[in-house]
Amino acid sequence: MPQADDEEITLPPPLMTVPVQRHVHGQAAPWQCDQVAAEVPVALVCNGLSHAVMMCTPQDLPELALGFALSEGIIDCASDCYGIDIAAVDAAAPSDWAAAGASEYSLPALAVHLDIASSAFMRLKQRRRNLAGRTGCGLCGIDSLQAHDWLPAPGAAAPPPWLAQIGPPTIFKALAAMAEQQTLNHATGALHAAAYADVHGQLHAIYEDVGRHNALDKLLGARARALQGGTTRNDGPAWPQQGFVVMSSRASYELVRKCARLHLPLLATISAPTSLAIRVAEIAGLQLWGLAREPRAVRYTR
């Protein structure tokens, strides 16, 4: 099970203190300190090959990296990742700052290095070769609609019997618990959350990030590590095999596809889904709920 060496460096805090001045009814209050969400460039590097750069909350990065690798199909299972290391880097281009006469400035960033199986790495390199030099639709550098991995594999298995136990009351219970446990968002009002609940609506883990995709990848990575016997920040009672995901965002097709790829049968979100999210969920056989705000919830797939 991959373990991370993130203790060797000091990660930036997930919250930053900044001076602010509040204006209410035309009156300006004195300047005071407040907290905002930290947003840091994070590069994901697979076997020395830089694959993606995301803007993230600098917390739970090993879970983020593993979840991203799994949900994007870079690796097939958690055991395909042999290790995760984190390094501090400077994302600023020195020549740009020098030209501006401000060479003392820098942009702290992080690089998360994954050591993955050679077969997965060869597949990743082939995928990158297929995308190299392409331009056109502006999505991930692809040059045609058919070149993008829009849809998951069609759901072959019937819905698990326990899924019938989950309805609006269970979803409302999980979402209420998630809202209470969004500690970073309570301090800033700027972070999304993804949480994992059992069939009774009991929350077992929650992860936050400035990006909804990142929050979900952190959750998926933590679940994969836990099911493989690894440790996570949310360690406590064992993660149940039977469970579902709730999120504080809208349901985009990427979130649905990520859940489907890791065989999670139900996703419920506070806001509405898009038409493509519904279509992807239908193909994957995933039960999709949206606008889940008590007393109302909308089910979008049969």
Image (cartoon, rainbow, N blue to C red):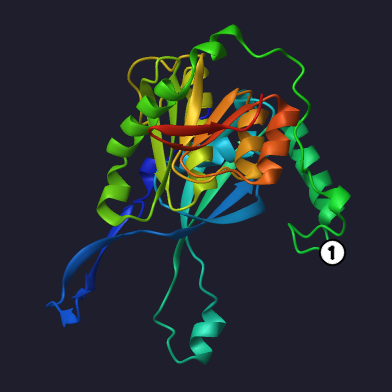
Expressed as whole percent of the image width and height from the top left, the position of residue 179 reads 32, 38
Q: Residue furthest left?
A: 30
Which residue position holds label 1? 133
Which residue shows up at 41% across the image and 21% down it?
170
Which residue shows up at 56% across the image and 83% down it?
95
Residue 71, quarter of picture: top right
Vertical placement of residue 293 versus 197, above or below: below
Residue 126, quarter of picture: top right
Which residue shows up at 52% across the image and 79% down it?
94
Q: Residues within 10 Å of mark 1 (few under 14, many from 20)?
A: few
> In the depicted view, which residue is nearer to us: 206 or 157?
157
Residue 102, quarter of picture: bottom left
> In the depicted view, which residue is nearer to us: 2 or 211?
211
> In the depicted view, which residue is nearer to us: 40 or 271?
271
Which residue shows up at 54% across the image and 46% down it?
213
Answer left or right for 90 relative to 38: right
Asked if residue 164 can be seen in this view, the reply is: yes
> In the depicted view, which residue is nearer to us: 242 or 104?
242
Vertical placement of residue 240 versus 2, above or below: above
Expressed as whole percent of the image width and height from the top left, the position of residue 156 reads 77, 17
Amino acid, disc 1 = Gly
